[in-house]
Amino acid sequence: MAFWRDPSARALKKLVQRMPQHNSVDLSPGSSVFGLVLGSTNETTTVVDLASQTIVRWRIPWPPDIETDLAAFDVVQGDLAEDIERDDLAQPEAVTLRDLPRRLGTYRGRRVRRWLQRLASPADGPLFGFRGPSAPYWEFRGERPSVALIAADRGPQLLRRHDDGSTWVRFGWFGDDVWLLCEDSHAVRTMEATRRSALSGKDLAATLGFRPTYVLTTLSQPIDGHCYKSCTGLLPRG
């Protein structure tokens, strides 16, 4: 059905475009929040908060036997918990939802492209302020973001390690050669389906179904006292 004839698509477009705008993220306990998904794992879902157009990380209470089914550019609605847990110095953007969010539809287009361009991380030293794959949790002070939307200088490239079956993303960013564990479920499934050890350029774009323009990178919760860098999304222009 054409977009203009689809009532649900029209309603979603109206919701996004008429969303009341605020200068900051609403942190009122129990308040309803709307986000555009950039990447989602069971640990964290990264969204553009539609009211402030700011990147936020949602902690969603997924049941142990349910994997996240949220995908890039899904529009979702959730309710903040009574205790949103804003005390994590390694993840200052993170807030906790009371329950599972509701998926309203998918939204893409020029407006999303403008948001991604504006939210892309500038060159400011090494990724997340430190070199290497991880940093001790006790070194974080809440002064740096734990999310970076990277417009890669080179790549990205998907690589599969046969010794443990893990998928990695490699890309260049302001002179650094960055390797990150890939936690983007679509990219991982794509890599597994090809049975190839590397994908890049036109082959990667054809397999993913889009040309990856941005690499969504995040810091993990502490694992044995360290927070690790990972890729939680490969995104097109919008």
Image (cartoon, helix red, strand yellow):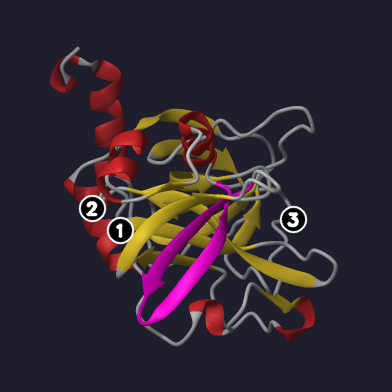
* Disc assigned to residue 74: none
Residue 172, quarter of picture: bottom left
Instruction: Categorize mark 2 by other alpha carbons within 10 Å: few (<14), some (14-19), many (20+).
Output: some
Of the residues shown, which amino acid type is indicated by label 2? Arg
Give the CA distance from mark 2 to mark 3: 33 Å
Q: Residue 171's spot in the image, x, y percent?
A: 41, 65
Q: Nearer the viewer, residue 196 or 10?
A: 196
Does the magenta stretch mainly form a helix, a strand or a loop?
A: strand
Q: Is residue 148 rendered to the left or right of residue 154?
A: right
Q: Which residue bears the numbered disc 3?
A: 83
- Which amino acid, by three-letter code, is at mark 1? Leu
Circle 3 residues within 10 Å: few <14, some 14–19, many ≥20? some
Q: Are marks 1 and 2 in contact (CB under 8 Å)?
A: yes
- Which mark is on residue 113? 2
Rendered residue at 63%/45% (across/down): 162
Circle 3 sits in a helix, a strand or a loop, which is it?
Answer: loop
Q: Is residue 144 above or below residue 48?
A: below
Above or below residue 160? Residue 226 is: below
Q: Is residue 201 above or below residue 137?
A: above
The magenta segment: 166-183
> Can the viewer see residue 52?
no
Residue, far right: 224
Q: Are marks 2 and 3 in contact (CB under 8 Å)?
A: no
Q: Residues within 10 Å of mark 1 (few under 14, many from 20)?
A: many
Distance from Cα at disc 3 to Cα at disc 1: 30 Å
Q: Is residue 159 highlighted in magenta? A: no
Residue with the mark numbered 1: 116
- Name of the residue lying farthest toward the top: 1
Asked whether, in this view, residue 230 is left or right of residue 2, the answer is right
Question: What amino acid is labelled 3 in the image?
Answer: Asp
Q: Which tag is nearer the camera, tag 3 or tag 1?
A: 1
Comes first in the chain, label 3 or label 1? 3
